[in-house]
Image (cartoon, rainbow, N blue to C red):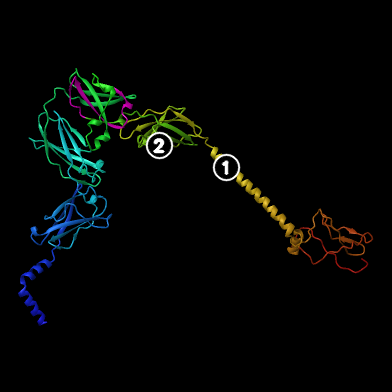
Amino acid sequence: MLGLLGSAALVLVAGAPWVLLAAADGEELEPPEDVDVYIVDDNLTLKWSHKGEPAGNVTFSAEYQTDEMENWLKLPGCHHVTGTECEFSLLNTNIYAEMKFRVRAETGKSTSSWAEVDPFIPFLRAHIGPPGVRLEAEDQAIVVDISYPGRGGKMWEGDTLRFQYRIVIWQRSSNETKTITTSYYTIKISKLLPETTYCLKVKAIHTFRGKHSNYSAVQCINTTEASKMPVPENIEMDALGESYVLRWDCAPADVSFRAQWLPNFYKSTSGSSPDKWKPIPACADIRTMQCVFPRNTIHTDHFLLRVQAFRGNNTSFWSEEKLINSQKYTKIPPPIVAVTPTRDSLLVYVSCQDHSLSKCRKLTYEVVFWDKTSNTKRRVVKESPEFTIENLQPQTVYCVQARVLSFATWNKSSDFSDALCDATRPGNSSSMNWILTVLGTLFFSALALYAGKNLVKCLNSEFFSSPKPPPSIDEVFSEPPSKYLLFLTPEEHTERCFIIENTGTVAVTGGNPSPEGEHRKYTSQSSQDSGNYSNEEESTGSENSQGLRPQGCPEHSGPF
């Protein structure tokens, strides 16, 4: 051990300059720290810090990788740089794919370890840059032409309809500001003063993601001197049958006018729209301050109108643009009504004649109905196109009319439809049918039960006969004997029994007693033995009974 230490000490003493250089070359470089990515529109900036050698002795290189790549690629413009940041354009990359970045320090042939950034999706991490703004001055207006943030790039090109723009305008000589929020890319700010300097700035707001940009750089512009040709004002439009009537105000009486229209969606599309305006042929050169043109001249529901005055080669500035919603001027046709009557109600169906879903949505209907024999009308308002009018009289003719009470967002109503009359059903028909059905069911049920019972009885007697005696015989033998003692009645034929008191007379004791209660007496010569005898031991009822009962004949042995 001591020998090794001695050898090392000898080497250090003998070759100190070389060993110190080797130690310096072998020293590991510190990797970059605080690596971060900042994205504005399509521009990416990679930043980091470093605590190591002086900046002039160390350079840095960066690489990137997406989830669509297998290998790391050098980051363009960020190889062997001496600073602590570099920029990178995302125009040629997929902004919806996950990306990773890494940076390392380098000096000579030595490199540090890589310092990586957590993976991220550029579109979700991007910030919105200020919009582009271009100004054009008139005598009493400024036309502001806005371009969406990062115009020409791919970061926001699919979101142009999701931006709103907030414009702040003020006179340079005043601190009073006016704020305007719009979704248009071209907007005309009117009612300004001629030959006055106005300044403005604009910022973009992404309505879906809730992000906004910083304001654009402040721009100032002077309005021009007042034009000798006044601009038409107070643009108004109305409907007349199948035509539109356009009206405006203008001071000079010796000028001509022309009008143009523009589909509204062009105003929400980035880019200049002057070449998109279309002339209205019926309003191309007129001397009056109104013009009438067919509705079919314009083929969209939402559009803008503008009017210009001219005399020879002199023209005024275009008027302030007027946004028109054609639904406001559309005459609503009466609805279609259908009725299904019941005993005491009417089921009413109301439908819109215009089969366009956008025009028939959210309608409210007013329905009037009355008894045809009466002038008293009742009114109901329904939001559903199908409903029931209840508590009506049976077998009565009712009439129904309906109209559209409100149309979309406009407080408008249609004319009433033609009256539709129908009679409710008879009042007792359903009850009588129910009663007859129940009675018929009961009758046929009883008939089937009776037939079934007889059938079962017949089958039992035919195939399952009992060995018991007939019911009449069985009834006799099953009851106590005393029940069937013979009671004589006056109608029955009875045999007489004679008691021989002596040889001379015979008292009749059997049969029915005479009313006088006396015995008849016969001579022995006239009496005959019938040969019938009764049982003395049988008795029914008490001895005091008032009814007739047979009296038994005593046993005797003699000639009889």
Q: Which mark lies nearer to you, 1 or 2?
A: 2
Amino acid at pointer 1: Ile
Image quadrant in which the C terminus is located: bottom right
Task: Kindly tell me whether residue 542 is visible in this rendering.
Answer: no
Looking at the image, residue 334 sits to the left or right of residue 553; the answer is: left
Q: Which residue is mark 2?
A: 385
Tell me where the magenta segment starts and ends, as one range.
Answer: 292-320
Q: Is residue 319 magenta?
A: yes
Quarter residue 35 falls in = bottom left
Instruction: Tell me the residue at 16%/57% (across/down).
Output: 61
Mark 1 / mark 2, whichever is N-terminal: 2
- Residue 219: % across, % down: 12, 38
Q: Is residue 442 magenta?
A: no
Relative depth, front residue between 45 and 321: 45
Q: Which residue is mark 1?
A: 435
- Residue furthest right in the image: 525
- Residue 313: % across, % down: 18, 21
Neighbor class of circle 1 (other Cα within 10 Å; few <14, some 14-19, many 20+) is few
Neighbor class of circle 2 (other Cα within 10 Å; few <14, some 14-19, many 20+) is some
Quarter residue 181 falls in = top left
Amino acid at pointer 2: Pro
